[in-house]
Amino acid sequence: MSQTATLLQLQGSQAIQFNGITFEHTDWPIPDRGYPGIQACMFDDRSPQATGWSPIPAAVELEETREAVFRNCTFRHLGGSGVSIGKNSHDNQLVNCTIEDVAGNGINIGEGQDRQVEGQPWWKAVPQQVSSDNRITHCRVNDCGTVFYGAVGIWCGLVARTTIDSNEISKLPYSGISIGWMWDTVPTPCLENAVLDNHIHHIMGILSDGGGVYSLGRQPGSRISGNLIHDVSINAGRAESNGMFLDEGTKELVISDNIIYHIAMSPLRFHRAASARIENNVLSCNDGLPPIRYNRTPEDNITKINNVILQDTLAQDLHLLEERVQQWQSLWNGR
């Protein structure tokens, strides 16, 4: 019996609610031209009509959709990605959903750079079409990337006022949350996004050069705050895997009140980053490793205020770390 890659498509829809529905058992065969993967389940499909990178299709896809709500839903046993909140979509929500056993990304929000409008990239020609004000809250995203190892739990491209709040993201081959999709500091409509109070753990199980949270590009007014990130593996690639990897073009980003520990390499890493503010974080390191790694990033670009630096092997530091983690978990359980 043949299976489809997409079970539900919403195009131009508004104010539809889904409660307690299970979406499962999709299939996405690798195209005849192969799967030249790029990053985060973007690939070059090599077709004559292609204008840029393409995403792996999702079981549920939204475009130009507003105020759709998926509550208490399950997305599992999927041969592509899980849920895609695509172009020009606003005020949509996933609340208390489970995404598991997914070949590709768990959740996609927004789009990349490549769509053309009147011969220009969309983000220059029609920046008002940026997907905005979408929320992912109290969801469980785990065991994604079972086939496509470049997968992430939650991918946010060029998006505005997106909130990723109080989710558990775990057991992934690559990064937990990826936000931004521009490898330099050029202004785009990507702004005022919030990654808050998520529990991200046991990620980077196969690939390297990622982290619990991965960022790209200029993101004014955006913040990564209050997250608990731990158990990030080291793998065979030349590049590190970190608690957070703030990659090329990262600018105007605030990183505050996070707890990061049991990281095989440095808790934070910057690569060709332009600016960031690092404040009130707890960063626990392995012996001999710096809490922050600067790759082609002048240290003066990064403002550091009131961070607590611990060593994984010191008894007094482990006691303080345990207290901070217990406090975080108590607040998490009360949400």
Image (cartoon, rainbow, N blue to C red):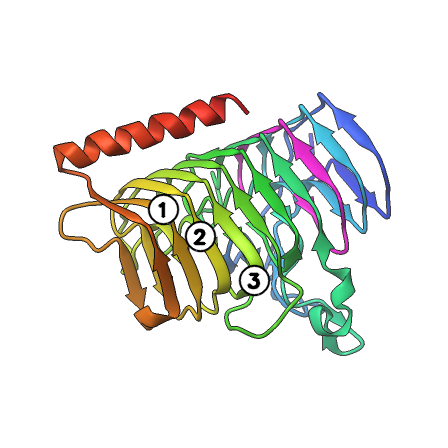
Q: Position of residue 45 (x, y in %)?
A: 61, 61
Badge 2 amino acid? Ile
Q: Residues within 10 Å of mark 3 (few under 14, many from 20)?
A: many
On screen, residue 85 versus residue 334, left or right, reads right
Q: CA distance from mark 1 to mark 2?
A: 8 Å
Badge 3 amino acid? Gln
- Residue at position x 37%, y 47% in the image: 280
Under circle 2, the secondary element is strand
* Residue 303 in sight here: yes
Q: Looking at the image, is mark 3 or mark 2 nearer the viewer?
A: 2
> What residue span does the magenta drawing correspond to?
84-104
Q: Which residue is mark 2?
A: 255
Q: Position of residue 36 (x, y in %)?
A: 51, 60
**Marker disc for residue 281:** 1
Under circle 1, the secondary element is loop
Which residue is more in the foreground, 73 or 128? Answer: 128
Q: Is residue 195 above or below residue 277?
A: above
Q: Which numbered disc flags the more N-terminal residue, 3 or 1?
A: 3
Is mark 1 in CB contact (under 8 Å) with mark 2?
Answer: yes
Q: CA distance from mark 3 to mark 1?
A: 20 Å
Q: Is residue 216 magenta?
A: no
Occupied quadrant, residue 123: bottom right
Badge 1 amino acid? Asn
Is mark 3 in CB contact (under 8 Å) with mark 1?
Answer: no
Under circle 3, the secondary element is strand
- Residue at position x 48%, y 45% in the image: 225
Q: Which residue is mark 3?
A: 219
Occupied quadrant, residue 62: top right
Q: Residue furthest bottom?
A: 119
Q: Residues within 10 Å of mark 1 (few under 14, many from 20)?
A: many
